[in-house]
């Protein structure tokens, strides 16, 4: 049965950096946001007031009992994703979960199964796909404009964890998982290049590094991107064994090869994802810090830069573009477009149709890639994804 996006209502779990991004994206997509829940009733109430939401739930269970909500957004630390996603699906709610989907592939396998059996929509917030020029790149590569994909290289680099006084739950393996930079930002890149090329990564060889073996943990925690800790805040040294940076060599199903560099300790790079996809006829390159430009490389004529302009884009990219050329769209717009896609699918009501958003199956694939990368790093050898299944 089909309905309208505007008739759907959602609640957000998590009040940190990314929870409010979801609230804003939902509102801009036209979805009603019924309320939010944090790690305590006080935090829920404060977030609801700050964000102008009708309700700060007392608990996650209270949120699940709210029959007015059709979907739940999980923006909690990674260690909660499995339990919360499973409970929400069992309660008959559609789920949009932040990445990585779970802590282990055993958990993500179970979530894929539960999602299938629940008959609910289940998506993972790989929002970077929803920059219009990333959809444009996918249409061009899959439509053979660039020829056979030969190699794919790039990086995702940030600087918000450069100093040993920089801290967030993500640096702790028990909260975020054994892999950090690769899982937190690397999987965005891995998801993106597989989406664009239509080719799965089948084998990896990783070399990872923890720059700060100890970090200063402030009492009371710290939000992502909150800047260097104040010397006046009490903190204590804690051992860290998650990756600050590293490289992963890749082999794709069609024989293409490539590599990814990830780092959360590159001074000056705030949140910078770059890819370069080389085909037999052309190359494409893109940088998330100038997201409205796609570079098109030629061998036998001058290179081009395509400036995002809906009138010049393929239908797939035009469909996720809201503003005319020159009116730049960025990070918050990707969430709006992802949510329009997710709720548009729910509203259309045909769950046998292919999902236009990253699904739990995509999220599971990313966990397999992470496990293969970690194993490869520890055993100092190539690891196939099949081996890690
Ligand atoms: C922190 O590294 C973080 O917030 C990621 O968790 C997000 O996925 C990315 O979009 C920005 O950086």
Image (cartoon, grey):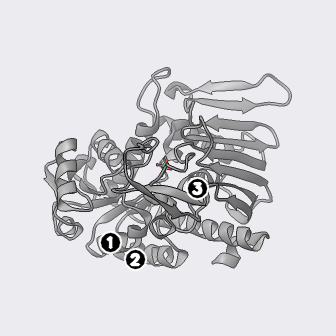
Q: Are the residues at dot 3 and dot 1 in contact (C-beta closer than 8 Å)?
A: no
Per the image, label 2 sits on a secondary structure element best described as helix
Task: Classify 126 as above or below 27.
Answer: below
Q: Helix or strand or loop: what does disc 3 sit on?
A: helix
Tell me the mark number nearer the camera, choosing from 3 and 1.
Answer: 3
Which residue was labeled with disc 2?
A: 114
As drawn, 243 above or below 120: above
Give the mark nearest the N terminus, 3 or 1. 1
Seen in the image, is 30 located left or right of residue 321? left
Residue at mark 1: 89
Rendered-image quadrant of the N terminus: bottom left
Q: Quadrant of the C terminus?
A: bottom right
Determine whether label 2 and label 1 are within 8 Å by CB.
yes
- The one nearer the camera, 251 or 263, is 263
Q: Position of residue 355 (x, y in %)?
A: 46, 58
Residue at the image point whose x is 70% and y is 51% from the top = 260
Q: How far apart, in angstroms, are the residues tagged by discs 2 and 3?
A: 28 Å
């Amino acid at each position: 049965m089909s309905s309208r996006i505007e008739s759907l209502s959602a609640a957000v779990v998590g009040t940190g950096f990314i929870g409010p991004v979801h609230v804003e994206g939902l509102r801009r997509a036209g979805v009603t946001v019924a309320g939010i829940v944090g790690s305590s009733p006080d935090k829920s109430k404060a977030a609801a007031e700050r964000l102008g939401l009708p309700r700060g739930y007392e608990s996650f269970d209270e949120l699940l009992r709210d029959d007015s909500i059709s979907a739940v957004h999980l923006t909690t630390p990674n260690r909660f994703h499995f339990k919360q996603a499973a409970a929400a699906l069992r309660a008959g709610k559609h789920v949009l979960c932040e990445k990585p989907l779970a802590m282990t592939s055993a958990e993500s396998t179970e979530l894929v199964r539960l999602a299938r059996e629940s008959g609910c929509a289940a998506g993972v917030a790989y929002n970077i796909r929803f920059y219009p020029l990333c959809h444009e790149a996918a249409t061009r590569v899959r439509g053979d404009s660039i020829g056979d994909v030969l190699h794919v290289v790039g990086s995702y680099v940030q600087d918000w964890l450069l100093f040993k006084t920089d801290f967030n739950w993500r640096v702790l393996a028990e909260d975020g998982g054994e892999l950090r930079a690769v899982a937190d930002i690397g999987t965005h890149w891995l998801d993106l290049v597989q989406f664009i090329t239509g080719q799965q990564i089948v084998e990896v060889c990783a070399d990872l590094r923890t720059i700060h073996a100890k970090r200063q943990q402030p009492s009371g925690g710290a939000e992502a991107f909150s800047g260097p800790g104040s010397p006046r805040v009490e903190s204590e040294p804690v051992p860290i064994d998650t990756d600050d940076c590293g490289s992963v060599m890749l082999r794709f199903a069609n024989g293409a090869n490539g590599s990814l560099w990830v780092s959360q300790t590159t001074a000056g790079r705030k949140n910078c994802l770059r890819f370069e996809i080389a085909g037999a006829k052309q190359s494409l390159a893109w940088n998330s810090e100038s997201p409205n430009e796609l570079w098109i490389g030629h061998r036998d004529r001058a290179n081009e830069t395509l400036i995002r302009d809906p009138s010049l884009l393929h239908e797939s990219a035009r469909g996720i573009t809201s503003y005319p050329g020159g009116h730049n769209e960025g990070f918050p717009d990707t969430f709006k477009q992802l949510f329009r896609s997710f709720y548009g699918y729910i509203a259309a009501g045909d769950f046998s149709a292919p999902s236009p958003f990253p699904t739990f199956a995509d999220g599971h694939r990313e966990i397999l890639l992470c496990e293969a990368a970690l194993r490869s790093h520890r055993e100092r050898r190539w690891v196939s994804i099949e081996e890690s299944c």
